Amino acid sequence: VQVVESGGGLAQPGGSLRLSCVVSGVTFSDFVLSYWRQFPDKEREVVASVSVEGRPTIYRNDVKGRFTISRDNTENTAYLQMNSLKPEDTAMYYCQANVPFSPNNYWGQGTQVTVSA
């Protein structure tokens, strides 16, 4: 199983980035896809999740209206569109693929997002 993230980088405050997460080696449509982030010396926190059919989606409060999670089951890919970025969004972002209530839980290697002028 491979979970490969891309799309991180440097953005200015108010700018946008789109993260991608490609999952291979499993039946992609069986998995809930989530993005998490981790600040230095802090625990990882969930940012957004999308269920197997693309709905429903769930967001943490401080990204609602700014971030959009989606998935394309034909491409085995999940996306996190991040708009109106703030410096406090700076973190390492991780993609998780999991089947709830099962041991099938996989993580990507992380992609750094830095928001700075």
Image (cartoon, rainbow, N blue to C red):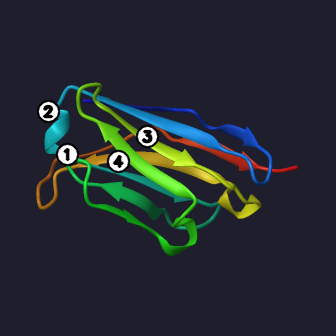
Q: Residue at x 58, y 49 (%)?
A: 82
**Residue placed most toward the observer, 55 or 104:** 55
**In the drawing, does residue 32 fall left or right of residue 47?**
left
Question: CA–CA distance between discs 2 and 4?
Answer: 14 Å
Question: CA–CA distance between discs 2 and 1?
Answer: 7 Å
Query: Which of the marked residues, 3 or 4, is nearer the chain's N terminus?
Result: 3
Q: Residue at x 55, y 65 (%)?
A: 63
The type of residue carrying mark 4 is Gln
- Name the image quarter holding residue 73: top left
Which disc number belongs to residue 96?
A: 4
The type of residue carrying mark 1 is Phe
The reply to whether callout 1 and callout 4 are in contact (CB within 8 Å) is: no
Horizontal and vertical percent for residue 39?
62, 61
Q: Residue at x 57, y 71 (%)?
A: 62
Q: Residues within 10 Å of mark 2 (few under 14, many from 20)?
A: few
Between disc 1 and disc 4, the foreground one is 1
Q: Which residue is mark 3?
A: 79
The type of residue carrying mark 2 is Thr
Rendered view: 8 above or below 88: above
**In the drawing, does residue 38 fall left or right of residue 116?**
left
Question: CA–CA distance between discs 3 and 4?
Answer: 12 Å
Q: Secondary structure at mark 2?
A: loop
Between disc 2 and disc 3, the foreground one is 3
Viewport quadrant of the N terminus: top left
Which disc number belongs to residue 31?
A: 1
Q: Which residue is mark 2?
A: 27
Between disc 1 and disc 3, the foreground one is 3
